[in-house]
Amino acid sequence: MRSTTFGAFCMFIFLALIFSTSNAIAQSRNSELKVTKDRDRRSANELDPTQYQMELVNNGFSSQTYQIVVNNYEGTFTVKGRRPQLLGASNPINTAVIQNKIRNNTITVPARSTGVFLLDASVPPGTPVNKWAGLEVRAISNACPDGSVIKLLKLYVSDPTEE
């Protein structure tokens, strides 16, 4: 009788672990990262930085905490159906994640809610103009680091003397 009880207890623990792990994975993969009003293309130059308003949607049943990581995108993309001239890897764009007027790369979004943050993008002096840069924004859930959501932003580096 005792071994049956112990076996049932072990089975309960095993099932609980599987359920909690699959629930955490499902929660983090049930997130969305968007740009407000789908405005994923902006322009900036050395004198005039820009901001993207981002929305992080948590469709899960529990609160999620995310790390926001921004990298310069190394691939190609299209703008209005065409491949634009891109900045090289040696010309990174400066970025900062802003939440409630404070630089903060961590955002917590309650269950069934949307968190809003700004992504500041500024162009360093000497960056070639009339070219595009891609910014890969990744929201990594603390519950499941492998279940991140990604959004590609496009930045046109305009010539400040032509504006």
Image (tube, rainbow, N blue to C red):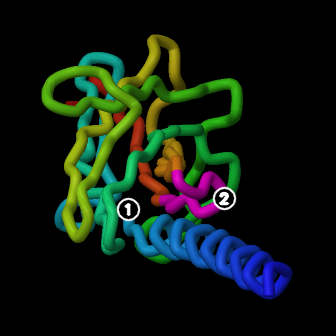
Residue, x 40% and y 44% (percent of image)? 156
**Earlier-in-chain disc, 1 versus 2:** 1
Quarter containing the N terminus: bottom right
Residue, x 51% and y 39% (percent of image)? 70
Residue 147 highlighted magenta (yes or no): yes
Which residue is outermost to the left?
A: 100
Residue 148 placement, left or right of 102: right
Label 2 Cα crowd, 10 Å radius (few <14 / some 14-19 / many 20+): few
Question: Amino acid under label 2?
Answer: Asp
Instruction: Kindly identify which residue carries mark 2.
Output: 146
Residue 61's spot in the image, x, y percent?
Answer: 32, 72
**Which secondary structure type mostly characterizes the magenta part of the structure?**
loop
Residue 66 vertical position relative to residue 39 in the rendered view, above or below: above
Residue 144's spot in the image, x, y percent?
Answer: 59, 57
Instruction: Kindly identify which residue carries mark 1.
Output: 33
Residue 157's spot in the image, x, y percent?
Answer: 41, 36
Q: Nearer the viewer, residue 121 or 127?
A: 121
Q: How many numbered badges does the structure rendering display?
A: 2
- Dividing the picture into quadrants, the one containing residue 21 is bottom right
Q: Which residues are magenta?
A: 143-150
Q: Secondary structure at mark 1?
A: strand
Distance CA(mark 1)–CA(mark 2): 15 Å
Quarter containing the C terminus: top left
Label 1 Cα crowd, 10 Å radius (few <14 / some 14-19 / many 20+): many
